[in-house]
């Protein structure tokens, strides 16, 4: 099996949970393809006392069938269960027997894609809660790992359960896509010799999703890889977006409409504006849909200028952005990206996407600015009054009565600020100060790829951050 890379922190946590003598119910969740199953299987080398995996879109009979097969595989000799109460009763008997045999050694149980088992009217979640409260939690040194890609289901039914599983989860791990540092480590380990700008360009197309990264070919160039995955005759990711959403949500088309709307609005939209544009009620159901997209790392929600009212929703998943920007055009040229590389269309897209990459790496930015020991709040801001509209990509509001305003500039070489850009930066800062009424000191930070060229306009930058800083490992 492939080596475990980029998940050292999570691996250390899990090993700690296994070494203690407490009974544990550990929930691991995150978007599909992010590596949840691989993490657990690799750590335990597929040596479980019980392991079952739910079937995506399976019927009640399908799900109960695979559970019965798993019981038999791990040594249960009784009758096959016809309902979940009986299935969990059988599991309890199996695990009690194993606990006696192992004499205090950890009992490792892994139930993967747990939400799949919860088919309509199956009473699965009630029976699972009953099992854990009355049997599982009382088995000596049990470590029960549950995973699910339907992150919203995991949050509502397990983590924030109001029923039998209320406050029963002992630990939760939200497995997120790789950062740039983790992506670089993964690619280097797999003998890719790309520089950091090349890794950034791949990251803008695939995001830090380990499965997507595993499809790359280290014998091909970056444009050749993108063609292979998205535009070639047998492009592996051509239909991935539809497969992904169909597997995560019961009404995927409604979620796709939200995504499509936000793709066309670079700076994001408020919940009210989205509901109005989509012609739907701005009610609890719509709010739940937005939360589901946030839980799965497709969206982020940020407060405009720190204000809760008028919060902005924006897409953060780079694969989704790339798919909608280029793949929905039904391009038939298998060498499309090779031919488009270096064109204004691609360069403009890189520039816009680099802003979102920086927003995803705010912790690395704060670390580069050496504000780790200062309390900070960060957000994006856009004016409601200025004309032309003023917008600031990243604002770091610090407890030392200073604010760092970050301007993001993508360039393949050292970036040079000209007179026009100098005036735009001044205009945005003045609009921010006037509209927010802040009396804090304002410092300008320019985030580029390769640094800032010194000229008559570069003095506007109090601080400069480069791409190298975004590839930093955060403690």
Image (spheres, rainbow, N blue to C red):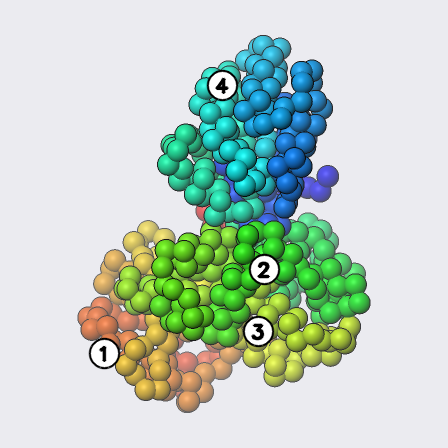
Q: Quadrant of residue 363?
A: bottom left
Number of callouts: 4
Alpha carbons under labels 3 and 2: distance apart: 13 Å
Question: Is label 4 in a helix, a strand or a loop?
Answer: loop
Seen from the viewer's position, the closer of residues 420 and 155 is 155
Q: Secondary structure at mark 2?
A: loop
The residue at 42%/31% (across/down) is: 165
Which of the two discs, 2 and 4, sits closer to the camera?
4
Residue 57: x percent and y percent?
Answer: 63, 46
Answer with the quarter of the image where residue 116 lies. top right
* Cα distance between the residues tagged 1 and 2: 37 Å
Q: Secondary structure at mark 1?
A: helix
In percent of the image, x 23 and y 72: which residue is there?
436
Above or below, 258 against 367 in this view is: below
Residue on which the image places disc 1: 434
Frontmost of labels 4 and 3 is: 4
Lower sequence index among marks 3 and 1 = 3
**Label 4: few (<14), some or many (≥20) within 10 Å?**
some
Can residue 361 be seen in this snapshot? no
Earlier sequence position, callout 2 versus callout 4: 4
The quadrant in which the N terminus is found is top right
Q: Residue at x 47, y 53 (%)?
A: 292
Give the crowd class for mark 3: few <14, some 14-19, many >=20 residues within 10 Å. Answer: some
Secondary structure at numbered mark 3: helix
From the image, tell me which residue sits under label 4.
135
In the rendered structure, the answer to whether residue 314 lies left or right of residue 186 reads: left
Give the Cα separation between the discs numbered 2 and 4.
Answer: 41 Å
Which label belongs to residue 350?
3
Q: Does 296 sit left or right of 216 as displayed?
A: left
x, y percentage for residue 61?
A: 65, 35
Q: Is residue 152 visible?
A: yes
Q: Which residue is mark 2?
A: 207
């Amino acid at each position: 099996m492939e080596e475990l890379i980029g998940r050292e922190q999570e691996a250390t946590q899990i090993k700690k949970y296994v070494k203690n003598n407490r009974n544990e119910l550990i929930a691991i969740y995150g978007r599909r393809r992010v590596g949840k199953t691989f993490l657990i299987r690799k750590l335990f080398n597929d040596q479980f006392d019980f392991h079952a995996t739910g079937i995506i879109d399976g019927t009640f009979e399908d799900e109960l069938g695979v559970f019965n097969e798993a019981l038999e595989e791990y040594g249960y000799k009784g009758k096959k269960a016809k309902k979940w109460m009986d299935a969990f009763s059988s599991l309890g008997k199996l695990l009690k027997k194993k606990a006696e045999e192992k004499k205090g050694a950890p009992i490792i149980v892994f139930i993967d894609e747990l939400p799949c088992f919860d088919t309509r009217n199956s009473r699965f979640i009630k029976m699972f809660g009953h099992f854990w409260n009355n049997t599982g939690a009382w088995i000596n040194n049990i470590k029960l790992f549950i995973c699910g890609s339907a992150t919203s289901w995991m949050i509502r039914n397990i983590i924030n359960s109001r029923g039998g599983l209320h406050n029963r989860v002992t630990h939760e791990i939200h497995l997120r896509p790789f950062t740039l540092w983790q992506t670089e480590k993964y690619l280097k380990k797999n003998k890719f010799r790309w520089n950091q700008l090349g890794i950034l360009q791949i990251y803008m197309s695939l995001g830090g999703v380990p499965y997507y990264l595993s499809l790359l070919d280290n014998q091909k160039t970056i444009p050749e890889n993108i063609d292979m995955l998205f535009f070639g005759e047998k492009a592996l990711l051509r239909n991935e977006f539809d497969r992904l959403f169909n597997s995560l949500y019961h009404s995927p088309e409604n979620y796709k409409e939200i995504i499509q709307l936000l793709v066309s609005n670079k700076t994001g939209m408020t919940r009210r504006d989205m509901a109005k544009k989509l012609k739907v009620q701005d009610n609890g159901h719509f709010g739940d849909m937005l939360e589901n997209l946030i839980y799965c790392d497709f969206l982020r929600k940020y407060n405009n200028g720190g204000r809760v009212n008028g919060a902005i929703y924006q897409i953060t998943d780079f694969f989704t952005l790339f798919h909608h920007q280029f793949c929905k055009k039904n391009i038939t040229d298998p060498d499309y990206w090779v031919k488009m590389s270096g064109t204004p269309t691609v360069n403009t897209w890189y520039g816009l996407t680099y802003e979102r990459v920086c927003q995803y790496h705010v912790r690395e930015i704060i670390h580069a600015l050496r504000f780790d020991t200062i309390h900070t709040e960060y957000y994006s801001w856009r004016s409601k009054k200025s004309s032309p509209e003023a917008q600031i990509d990243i604002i770091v509001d610090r407890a030392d009565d200073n604010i760092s305003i970050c301007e993001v500039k993508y360039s393949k070489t050292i970036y040079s600020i000209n007179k026009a850009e100098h005036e735009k930066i001044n205009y945005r800062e003045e609009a921010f100060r006037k509209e927010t009424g802040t009396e804090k000191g304002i410092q300008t930070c320019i985030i580029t790829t390769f640094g800032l060229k010194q000229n008559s306009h570069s003095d506007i930058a109090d601080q400069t951050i480069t791409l190298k800083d975004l590839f930093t490992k955060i403690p």
